[in-house]
Image (tube, rainbow, N blue to C red):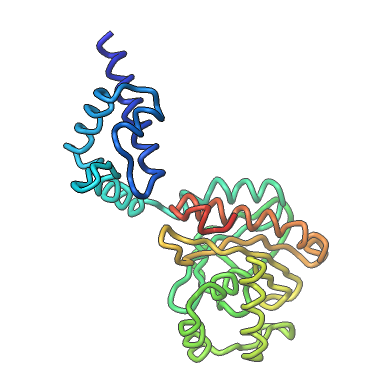
């Protein structure tokens, strides 16, 4: 019976935390009591315990309760422990199974992208990419997906340093045209590589954001032009955007920020 009461108290405490978290200005004991149908003395005891351990704090002027800084401490530790590859892997496998194409996960590093995961799919496709290899940003879908969300000053610095070297005759090498391309990428949320890096290969990619809203990575689907037609790329748009959002959410990026 005692164990049952303890579990019930924990459940009530979690309900109170959830309710208080939804109110920026905090809530008073009476308001909380009415919302979860628990008598005020029980609510007060639970709140007092939460305050004692730093999970709740009381405003001295209004008497209202707000979440304590202990949650910030715990969440920061959780965020520090997040491994992008581990969090993304289930979504990458899901995408590979659905499309049967090559799936890439890259991170941004010093003006380039670095492949940290590659799933081969079930179809035959020879690509230069491999885990650990670096690639330019201006002619890859993953690179453009990241560049579109970097500060403009950083983008210009990368272009000054790296230039826009031609990899195929489809590579965008004009600076103004490339900057216009990035605007389009940001407007639609995904980037394309239409044989700009390798002949015969087309890709579609979406950015990945961390808990601070900073773009740190990208995910892509790559395939041969014979399969990655304009029609199929159009069909994959919604899915790649969804996968990018799901991975971002696992890193702590909120759905409201993602405008989903």
Q: In the rendered image of this protein, does residue 74 appear above or below residue 233? A: above
Q: In the rendered image of this protein, does residue 252 appear above or below residue 135? A: above
Query: Residue 190: image x %, image y %?
Result: 64, 66
Question: Between 194 and 216, which is closer to the camera in this rendering?
Answer: 216
Picture quadrant where residue 38 is located: top left
Query: Residue 136: image x %, image y %?
Result: 56, 78
Q: In the rendered image of this protein, does residue 44 appear above or below residue 108? A: above
Q: In the rendered image of this protein, does residue 44 appear above or below residue 235? A: above
Q: Quadrant of the C terminus?
A: bottom right
Q: Quadrant of the N terminus?
A: top left
Q: Is residue 249 left or right of residue 191?
A: left
Query: Residue 101: image x %, image y %?
Result: 70, 56
Identity of the residue furthest to the top in this view: 1
Residue drawn at 81 percent across, 66 percent down: 230
Residue drawn at 20 percent across, 48 percent down: 61
Q: Is residue 12 left or right of residue 69?
A: right
Query: Residue 45: image x %, image y %?
Result: 22, 27
Question: Between 144 and 3, which is closer to the camera in this rendering?
Answer: 3
Q: Is residue 198 left or right of residue 85?
A: right
């Amino acid at each position: 019976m005692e164990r049952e009461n303890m579990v019930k108290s924990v459940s009530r405490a979690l309900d109170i935390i959830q309710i208080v978290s939804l109110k920026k200005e905090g809530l008073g004991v009476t308001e909380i009591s009415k919302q979860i149908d628990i008598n005020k003395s029980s609510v007060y005891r639970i709140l007092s315990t939460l305050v004692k351990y730093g999970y709740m704090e009381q405003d001295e002027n209004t008497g209202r309760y707000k979440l304590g800084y202990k949650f910030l401490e715990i969440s920061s530790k959780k965020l520090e422990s997040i491994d992008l590859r581990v969090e993304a892997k289930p979504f990458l496998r899901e995408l590979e199974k659905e499309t049967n194409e090559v799936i890439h996960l890259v991170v941004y590093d010093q003006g380039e992208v670095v492949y940290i995961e590659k799933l081969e799919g079930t179809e035959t496709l020879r690509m230069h990419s491999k885990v650990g290899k670096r690639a330019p940003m201006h002619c890859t879908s993953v690179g453009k997906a990241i560049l579109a969300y970097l500060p403009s000053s950083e983008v210009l610095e990368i272009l000054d340093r790296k230039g826009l070297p031609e990899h195929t005759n489809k590579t965008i090498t004009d600076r103004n045209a490339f900057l216009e391309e990035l605007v389009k990428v940001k407007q639609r949320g995904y980037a394309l590589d239409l044989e700009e890096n390798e002949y015969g290969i087309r890709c579609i990619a979406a950015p990945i954001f961390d808990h601070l809203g900073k773009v740190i990575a990208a995910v892509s689907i790559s395939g041969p032009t014979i399969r990655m037609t304009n029609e199929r790329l159009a069909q994959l748009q919604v899915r790649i955007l969804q996968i990018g959002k799901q991975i971002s959410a696992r890193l702590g990026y909120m759905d409201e920020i993602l405008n989903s």
